[in-house]
């Protein structure tokens, strides 16, 4: 029997944020030695094996009904992950995570085209505020554009597309099936580009553990999110998902010696604030199961 427990929910959300933050730090730490293809490949193998085992234990049917939407969900999610992992190796973690967390705004803005949902005036207002924050991060001097930051922003955009397809798939596919096929798709498409360096990377025990840790961090984060949403109101607990930005920024400061200047900090605050307000406004109108299905990493 499930019951609401706000303190427990926050604890699980903190666990999820620490897990995702650790995954981000491991991606950045290994990026100097490992290519993005290898990181995505190993991460997907770890998650795929775990989810497949759970599906078999629970008797979940992995048969895909809506092949087109599943393919587009997997493709957009893979593009988002590749862009995100690339950005993490090139810019401060705090910047990368913040720009990737623009995906709730993209979801809201794109929902009209994808799901025939009306875009409310508050969404446009928050999008403008978030856009100002994006400009402060991507173009600090308001003249040139930091291309590497665009990678993280692009990740947020494609992650939003992936989440919209998850919403379309919720009526035909089991949530675990969606996660499994995304992992399987990512393994299949990254195997060949990862192959040239994979054996040499896996011959290093430390790098191997780090690559596996990326998958474990992503999986543990998803577990934390699931239990958090089971223990509290979706609209309320969703706002705490932005703890990941704080955790990741602290990793950047403590482990990698990264510092965000005043423009970056103001930009982060504008984007995060807009996202929290939008999340609180949006999730009040969504069923709990739908919210759980599209939150978290791509």
Image: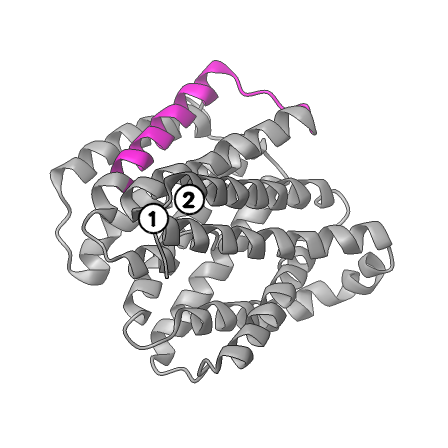
Return the x and y of residue 254 as percentages of the image width and height. 67, 25
**Point 21% across, 41% down: residue:** 281
Mark 2, secondary structure of its residue: helix
Return the x and y of residue 26 as percentages of the image width and height. 68, 44
**Relative height, residue 233 to residue 291 (above, below):** above
**Point 60% across, 73% down: residue:** 188
Seen from the viewer's position, the closer of residues 225 and 81 is 225
Q: Which mark is residue 4?
A: 1
Seen from the viewer's position, the closer of residues 192 and 19 is 19
Looking at the magenta stretch, what is its main secondary structure?
A: helix
The residue segment tinted magenta is 256-279
Return the x and y of residue 131 as percentages of the image width and height. 31, 32
Quarter of the image for the N terminus: give it: bottom left
Q: Are marks 2 and 1 in contact (CB under 8 Å)?
A: yes
Q: Nearer the viewer, mark 2 or mark 1?
A: 1
Residue 141 lies in what quarter of the image? top left
Residue 52 relative to residue 270: left or right: right
Q: Which residue has dot 2 on it?
A: 9
**Relative height, residue 273 to residue 14 (above, below):** above
């Amino acid at each position: 029997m499930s019951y609401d427990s706000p303190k427990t929910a926050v604890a699980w959300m903190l666990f999820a944020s620490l897990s995702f933050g650790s995954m981000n730090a491991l991606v950045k730490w290994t990026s100097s030695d490992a290519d993005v293809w290898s990181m995505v490949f190993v991460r997907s193998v770890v998650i795929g094996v775990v989810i497949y085992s759970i599906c078999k234990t629970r008797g979940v049917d992995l048969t895909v009904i809506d092949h087109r939407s599943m393919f587009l969900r997997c493709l957009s999610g893979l593009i988002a992950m590749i862009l995100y992992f690339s950005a993490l190796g090139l810019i401060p973690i705090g910047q990368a995570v913040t720009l990737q967390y623009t995906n709730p705004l993209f979801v809201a803005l794109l929902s009209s085209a994808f799901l025939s949902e009306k875009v409310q005036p508050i969404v446009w207002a928050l999008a403008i505020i978030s856009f100002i924050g994006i400009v402060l991060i991507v173009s600090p001097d308001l003249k040139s554009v930091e291309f590497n930051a665009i990678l993280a922003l692009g990740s947020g955009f494609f992650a939003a597309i992936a989440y919209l397809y998850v919403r379309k798939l919720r009526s035909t596919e089991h949530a675990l099936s969606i996660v499994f096929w995304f992992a399987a798709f990512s393994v299949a498409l990254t195997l060949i580009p990862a192959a040239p360096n994979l054996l040499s990377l896996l011959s290093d025990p430390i790098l191997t553990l780090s690559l596996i840790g990326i998958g474990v961090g992503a999986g543990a984060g998803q577990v934390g999110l699931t239990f958090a949403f089971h223990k509290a109101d979706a609209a309320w607990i969703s706002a705490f998902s932005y703890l990941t930005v704080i955790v990741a920024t602290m990793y950047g400061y403590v482990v990698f010696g990264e510092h965000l200047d005043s423009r970056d900090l103001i930009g982060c605050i504008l984007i995060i604030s807009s996202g929290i307000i939008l999340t609180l406004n949006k999730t009040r109108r969504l069923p709990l199961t739908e919210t759980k299905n599209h939150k978290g990493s791509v």
